[in-house]
Amino acid sequence: MGGLAALAREAGHRVTGCDAGVYPPMSDQLRALGIDLIEGFGADQMALQPDVFVIGNVVSRVRLPDGTPKFPLMEAILDAGLPYTSGPQWLAEHVLQGRHVLAVAGTHGKTTTTSMLAWILESAGQQPGFLIGGVPLNFGLSARLGAAQRPAPTPTPLGTAPLFVIEADEYDTAFFDKRSKFVHYRPRTAVLNNLEFDHADIFDNLAAIERQFHHLVRTVPPSGRVVVNGLEESLTRVLHAGCWSEVTNFGAAVSDFYAVGNPQAFDVMHQGRPVARVEWSLTGVHNQLNALAAIAAAHHVGVPPQEAASALASFQNVKRRMELRGTVGGVAVYDDFAHHPTALRTTLDGLRRSLGSSARILAVFEPRSNTMKLGSMKSQLPWALEPADLAFCHTAGLDWDATQALAPLGVGQGQRAQTAADIDTLVAQVVQSARPGDHVVCMSNGGFGGIHAKLLQALQNQ
């Protein structure tokens, strides 16, 4: 929603917005754009008299224990019969019309892959618009409209429409539209990066998510391309349900695009021939697959793989994706957005591969997503944290016993895992355990109570 507000502001609209507990980097970006951010959802905001209210999917009709609405502004909008729409619907109608949309979907890696693809197209001189659920360091902002006309388009049957790259989320659109957000985007290039169970608060099982992904596939035109991870059985099932567009797969040794070499330096193979080489600073097999997806998607709009690989050499990743926040007393503290068990595992695996077996990794994590709070994946946590030497879990707000879930690792002081119900205790546990040469990775899909700065300060003070 913050990126959407930035697009509306760039298009010349006066934009205000309200939310609760907004944290960096988005709060900083909105402030820099001159977008007024109002704390809370009070009905007094009706006085702003906007032309339209754009409703985010955090808003609902839920009532508090005392019977009052949690979102009184929404109730007032409905009572007054004022115009409102969802973020994805507004975007489809006011930004994406007339553009070649490249949409990146998947359980993991959407933000990183979308950022890679946008940077490849930017490096190729295409001046793409984009909307990304994070802040790519190469651009310093999460959204922009891009060129109204496509610069020097490569002659292709796809025409000369300007390009727009969007992170395509499978989460539902709004309380009044329970379809996945991505069905609004109508991409001509759709990346299906991976697919596993997530969002247990709105999906009953993996099949329900596969159905939504197939709805996305149904919207891709015959001249479009579906770029799909050939290693994922779930995505194979999605395509077997019907596909009416060109399919390019990546990842597997029999795919159209695959990699040969380690994730930090590898050859890109296209239909069995080496066509490019990627040498960059990112780690992890997951980022290698993200790169292949971005290269394959860029190829669809005329960017040769070699040119795409050259752009990736200068790709700087995204804020909160293994972002080094500081080093004190030889202890490095990183911030990472990982929250799903698979994402925790791949993040830690990538760091382990980069550091080798001798360095110690301390994983500090907050099960904050709705799925994790429900405890649907608590049994996967020992596996997810296995690459780390020590693990520290923030337990506030959980309805399940984290100590029990982490028992296979051994829980308690001097054990491999520790838990804490508040941030200060968690910080004290980490500082007591850390020693020079350690790498501390803080993983959450929220602000994590500012734990990164608190850790660095506590390390400085000891």
Image: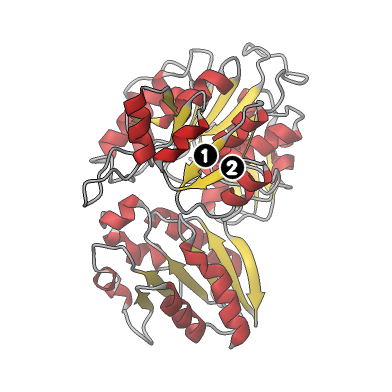
> To which quarter of the image does residue 46 belong?
top left
Amino acid type, label 1: Gly
Amino acid type, label 2: Asp
Question: Which quadrant of the figure contains the C terminus?
Answer: bottom right
Above or below, comparing residue 137 to residue 55 in the picture: below
Q: Where is residue 302 shown, x and y percent of the image?
A: 68, 23
Q: Name the residue nearer the viewer: 77 or 165.
A: 77
Residue carrying label 1: 17
72 relative position to 303: left or right: left
Q: Where is residue 439 shown, x and y percent of the image?
A: 56, 73
State the scheme by which the image is colored: secondary structure
Q: Where is residue 340 shown, x and y percent of the image?
A: 39, 54
First-in-chain label (1 vs 2): 1
437 relative position to 370: left or right: right
Q: Which mark is residue 36?
A: 2
Residue 247 can be seen, yes or no:
no
In space, the residues marked 1 and 2 are separated at their CA atoms by: 6 Å
Above or below, comparing residue 80 to residue 379 in the picture: above
> To which quarter of the image does residue 80 belong?
top left
Other-residue count near label 1 (Cα within 10 Å), few / some / many at <14 / 14–19 / ≥20: some
Helix, strand or loop for disc 2: strand
Q: Are marks 1 and 2 in contact (CB under 8 Å)?
A: yes
